[in-house]
Amino acid sequence: TRIRLKTEESTQIREIRSGSSYLSQSDLRAYFGLGTAKTADIEIEWPSGNQKSLHSVQPNQILVIKEID
């Protein structure tokens, strides 16, 4: 899954991969630093090709986002 976070000042990208380790699991959380930005837009692209966009997301929170068929 590719996550793109955009603020007025920058764009950050994180990729989350599951099932890539033998008998272990990598962290499925993506962390972003917003600096002085008050909001951010988030674009998510799942391996299936589905996409989701979130606009004007406030900082200092944990979001749980799931792909739903």
Image: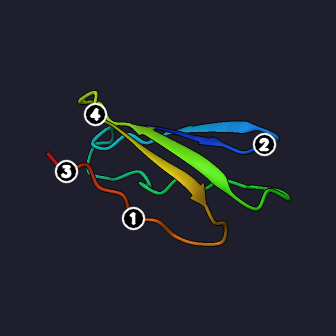
Q: Give the image location of residue 29, x and y in percent.
A: 47, 57
Circle nearer the N terminus (3, 4): 4
Q: CA distance from mark 3 to mark 2?
A: 29 Å
Q: CA distance from mark 2 to mark 4?
A: 25 Å
Residue with the mark numbered 3: 68
Q: How many marks?
A: 4
Give yes or no for contact between labels 2 and 1 (Cβ–Cβ under 8 Å): no
Quadrant of the image occupied by residue 12: top right
Using the image, determine if residue 11 lies above or below residue 65: above
Circle nearer the N terminus (4, 1): 4
Q: CA distance from mark 2 to mark 1?
A: 24 Å
Residue with the mark numbered 2: 8
* Kind of residue indicated by mark 1: Val
Residue with the mark numbered 1: 64
* Kind of residue indicated by mark 2: Glu
Query: Mark 4 falls on what kind of element?
Result: loop
Question: In front: 18, or 24?
Answer: 18
At x 25%, y 49%, the residue is 67
Residue with the mark numbered 4: 50
* Kind of residue indicated by mark 3: Ile
Depth-wise, is mark 2 or mark 4 nearer the camera? 2
